[in-house]
Image (tube, coloured by chain):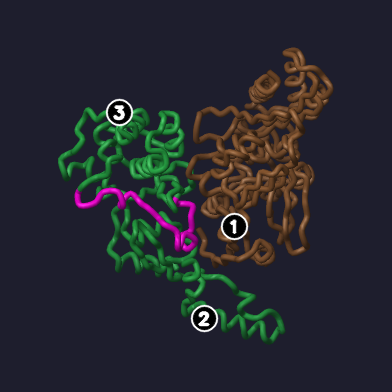
Chain colours: A brown, B green
Amino acid sequence: MKTFTLLPVRSLLEGGRESAKPGSILKAGGVDLLDRMKEGLETPDRVVSIAHVPGHDGIEVGPPARIGALATLARLDSHAELRRVYPALADAAGGAATPQIRNMATLGGNLAQRPRCWYFRQAEFDCTKKGGAQCFALNGENRFHAIFDTDVCCCIHPSATAVALLAYAARVDTVGTRGKRSISIEDFFVAPREDPTRENQLAAGEVIEAVVLPAPAPGSRSVYKKLKEKESFDWPLVETAVSVSVSRGTIQDARVVLGSVSPVPRRARGAEKILAGARPSAELIARAAEAAVAGATPLSQNAHKVRLARVMVERALREILA
Amino acid sequence: MADDSRSGFTRRDLVRGALVGAVAATAGAKTPAEADRGIGPGAVPITLQINGQTHRLTAEPRVVLADALRDRLGLTGTKVVCGRGACGACTVLVDGNPVCSCLLLAAEVQGRKITTIEALASDGRMKPIQEAFVAADALQCGFCTSGMVMSCKALLDRTPKPTRDEIRHAVSGNLCRCGTYPHVFDAVERAAGIRTAEGRAHPPDGTPVFQTLAASRTFTSDQRVDAGVAEALDLEEA
């Protein structure tokens, strides 16, 4: 790892201001950043650390819930009240990575981490995501890559919490040199077609301050499910978060989200349309699951992920509509 | 404690600060403090609270806790395998929570309570969890063992009578390529008194198993060159 100057700051705003200066980079838990620095993908002259900024690791369940960006994934997992109201988020956080990583990784960092594509993660590959001319995974080793939106960069977004947050229609509150703003979690992410070198719309000098989750509709249920090759220590092959509200036997509102299938977390709107206003049935669930993967464009090695995604949506819907 | 690091200016920093100051003054730009804030990149004083003792060292801000422990303080019981948070060999406890010491900057854990494998055995006697590892034959090559034991200790500190699922969960971040997991589960249950010890509860002192679990065994990667040679190599690298 190249040498650098370390600046521990006392506020998120200061962190934003300092990290916007040339050669500087922002650090929170540092799990993903130090990995990239050790790989030589990032070679900052200065690391601006918000790791010990006080007052931003709180979890207020509300609802609406407000979770400080510096809350660790372990705390999201172990927070009983958060788990009761927003179980999909607690499960997404609690199933990510390993116990050690969850003790270090922050919610803000989980949302802002860079993808795990093995071509992107090696300095030798000047891929689209690094500003290069080609996506090596497109015609290379791509069994773990995207099955949707694969035309520019076929990486998958690595954030598990984002998948749950999309199902809860969360907002990302930021603070920065240009003031504060609140961004819908869907608008937060940037698709490769817009700009392959980034995954979110955080501007220079802008820092995630908190994540806000609206109150769940009365009678709503939610679940997060993922499928991995190994039970622990593994990235998901596919993951899904589903939130539905049912009133008088009819589905009022449904949000179906797929993760690990596309460069940014994906709402399966086709499935949502089929569910809204309908009465739950096995046939309806099967149809919605089919719609969730409609239009998939799998790569040479990952056609199986289409089926996995369909099955996971089906299982998630069965569980909460049972 | 964390403030200690901020006052850690080296002579090099002073010289550079003065130079930047001179440039800034002529350009009418920012003050030196604003233009060049932060500690390092050279070695800075770092104070760590490890196993109840205060350790003072100087290290560059880029030095991670695992390297500070092993290379600067000679606490080689903590092992490093992947260096990327993917194996758990380097697991230590920070304020009681297991973390990967390969991904924590030493300068950023000042003032935190750090516990390493060396804290467990004392006066030639192992802690119950270590004795249980011996009794359950819960290790083969021993390279993951330090981290594995630390994860188990953190679990037992919080959950004295864990279920097997809780044990599995607790060591799910510790990769053992020898595949000793079933014996590790047994060891934790023995240490928790859930399973009565049937094997040797007290191994003969000085056996390799004892040394491994007490973190006093030297693995190949624990070999260190003479301090003078190391310094010369560091200078060459710089």
The percent coordinates of residue A74 (x first, y second) are 54, 43
Q: Horizontal placement of A45 versus A219: left or right?
A: left
Residue at left offset 45%, top offset 63%: B110
The label number, if any, that marks residue A27 in the structure image: 1
Cβ atoms under marks 1 and 3 closer than 8 Å? no
Mark 2 or mark 1, whichever is nearer to me = 1
The label number, if any, that marks residue B14 in the structure image: 2
Residue of label 3: B195
Report the Cα–Cα distance between label 1 and label 3: 44 Å
The percent coordinates of residue A119 (x first, y second) are 60, 42
SS class, disc 1: strand
Report if residue A146 is visible in the image. Answer: no
A226 is higher (above) or lower (below) than A23: above
Magenta stretch contains residue B138:
no
Q: Chain of mark 3?
A: B
Magenta stretch contains residue B122:
yes
B197 is higher (above) or lower (below) than B236: above
Three-letter amino acid code of the residue under disc 1: Lys
Question: Range of the magenta residues?
Answer: B101-124
Residue at left offset 40%, top offset 33%: B162
The percent coordinates of residue A78 (x first, y second) are 54, 40
Mark 2 or mark 3, whichever is nearer to me = 3
The percent coordinates of residue B23 (x first, y second) are 65, 83
Residue at left offset 56%, top offset 51%: A36
User: Within the image, what quadrant is residue B144 found in?
Assistant: top left
